[in-house]
Image: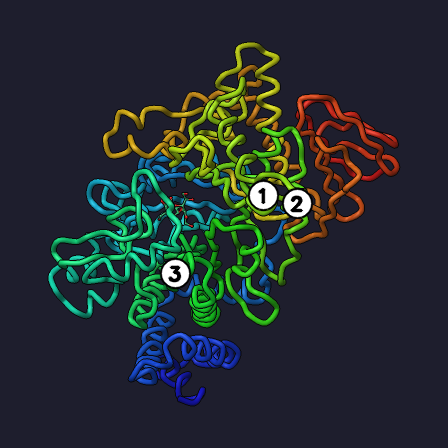
Amino acid sequence: MPSNVTSERMLAVLPHDLQAQAAQRLAVYEPVLRRLLAGLYGGHAGFDAWLGELMASLGALYSARPAELRALDAQRAAQPDWFLSQRMLGYCAYVQNFGGDLNGVAARIPYLQEIGVSYLHLLPFLRARAGENDGGFAVSSFDDVEPALGTNADLDALTTQLRAAGISLCSDFILNHVADDHAWALAAKGGDPAARAMFLTFPDRTMPDRYEATLGQVFPQVAPGNFTHVEAMGGWVWSTFYPYQWDLNYANPAVFAEMAAALLRLANRGIEVFRLDSTAFLWKREGTNSMNQPEAHQILQALRAIVDIVAPGVLLKAEAIVPTRELPAYLGSAGARECHIAYHSSLMAAGWLALSEQGTSVLREVIRNTPDLPQAATWLSYVRCHDDIGWNVLRAEAAAGGHDAKARLARASRFFAGAEGSYAVGATFQSSDPNAAHGTNGMAASLAGLQSAATDEERILALRRLLLLHGLALSFGALPVLYMGDELAMENDDSYLLRPQHAMDSRWLQRPVFDRSRWKGRDYAGTCAGKMYQSLIRMVRVRRQHDALAANAARTLLEEAPDGVLALARGDQFLAVMNFSSQPQSMALPGRWTDCLDGGILDGAVTLEPYAMHWLERG
Ligand code: OTU
């Protein structure tokens, strides 16, 4: 179908006053979208008719977009690097833990403003499967808020209030799978062939066994294997994660069209950022691990083209927990626009590894392997999130220099589980083999030693470690996201062991309820919570004042720093030096510098206390 015909299908459903703007965007992005979709689905009979229907449905969503959001779109399309400023700061929380429900979250907006937050990621809040639901990552309806957390009207009110406060709401968009009680899954169980085609189903084990030969496992202990037998269907369904999370079949164009429309309906409710969950898994290919396949990138690029046409104020964020070399592709290239933001899980894991090894070699290797990015795209930096710290993303970097990566990462995993006289209080995740590493769970403060600290001196060191990792996330050059509770040095929450539906998944160790008493005492520097809060806020404020700390401002690794120290120059006027070791470390500095955090002057050299950090400004 020629370009003008496809575009016409959208223009035909738009009101007159939107047509000129839409025509401009279509001129640029419709050819991109059509090429991508033809590549993915062009072989299907009726492709042209399907594409026409898709364009008409996107046009209807364009028309339905509220005027206020369309104004935001125009503003951001004119300034596409708006989210790269050093004034951007993220915060991530569960609705139920942070505010009880959506209205409770709205009541905490003043606290977010006090911290300087401009981006709030609320973990899954859409209607989830009854019973076990992987913390909401098993979605039953993309069009309804989870009743326990509020109503759709509450969501609309929250996005409006956040926007007025200058905070963009980020929502998970779980595009790889749906719950086994989503309408499509129920209809599939009922025998509806169109609904079955939304999933990857198999009559017997022949194909599952062939795929399994090269697939990995995300939850080897609690959800082994990648296929689930479904009695009602008399066969098997692909389920990468828990058995009740059914992978969607993106080889079916209907899946793509439904999911694109679901995303835009949420965008029209005022959600400004989508955390695209499990993006690496969208396309399956026999003989591979079915991760990071070229088609998965084409699907993301097609979603991006749709957003560029209908809702260019919206950001797409890739959650792909994959080796460093696979990450940059999720941010696209000069010729192919993909996601705006991607989690830098290697950087996060390497920060923790550096603490356990008291050396920065892996961290430096990760930074060397982190390429410059296309314009208007950036990393997301973080210290902790709701998941485990996955060690395997570091295999390549941990092997550099001839090391045994597996043994090295397993050592880190044991260290953070509290072995070998370590200060950490955490748990290994999904690994029964003590010689292999999978992941580590625990709140950042507990992993940094605060929970086990018995003396003031130990507490001071633990707080320095916690701040050090936050300093890395804030100075690296990324969109940094704080994880609820870390700003108040909250510790592990063991109560999940008492909840049968959570007890087998130790990720709940780091999903505590917001601690109101720590929050009330945050201005009192006599407690660990207060010390952490105030030091962190100081860093956030200093960061805001320095253009050199904007996400994509130049970054250089100073290789001459001692092994225990990471020295990162941002431009030629700003230098962050971080001691990951328990010993004082000295290094020469070129010229005279002022410490922006404590005002101290350093001339020609710096000596870092154990786990200390300095943010230095030339002069
Ligand atoms: C994502 O996670 C979510 O963040 C998890 O909370 C969900 O359980 C999961 O998807 C299923 O929806 O591999 O890239 O190792 O890092 O499950 C997708 C645990 C993922 C997580 C992993 C992750």
- What residue does disc 2 label? 365
Q: Which of disc 3 and disc 2 is earlier in sequence?
A: 3
Q: Nearest the camera: 197 or 212?
A: 212
Residue 249 in the image: x percent, y percent?
30, 64
* Residue 580 visible in the picture: yes
- For the view shown, which residue lies furthest in the top direction? 455
In screen coordinates, is 281 left or right of 550?
left
Q: Quadrant of the N terminus?
A: bottom left
Q: Quadrant of residue 359?
A: top right
Q: Which of disc 2 and disc 1 is earlier in sequence?
A: 1
Q: Residue at x 43, y 62 (%)?
A: 69
Q: CA distance from mark 2 to mark 3?
A: 29 Å
Identity, as a three-letter code, of the amino acid under mark 1: Leu
Within 10 angstroms of label 1, few (less than 14), some, or many (20 or more) residues? many
Within 10 angstroms of label 3, few (less than 14), some, or many (20 or more) residues? many
- What residue does disc 3 label? 282
Which circle marks residue 347 in the picture?
1
- SS at mark 2? helix
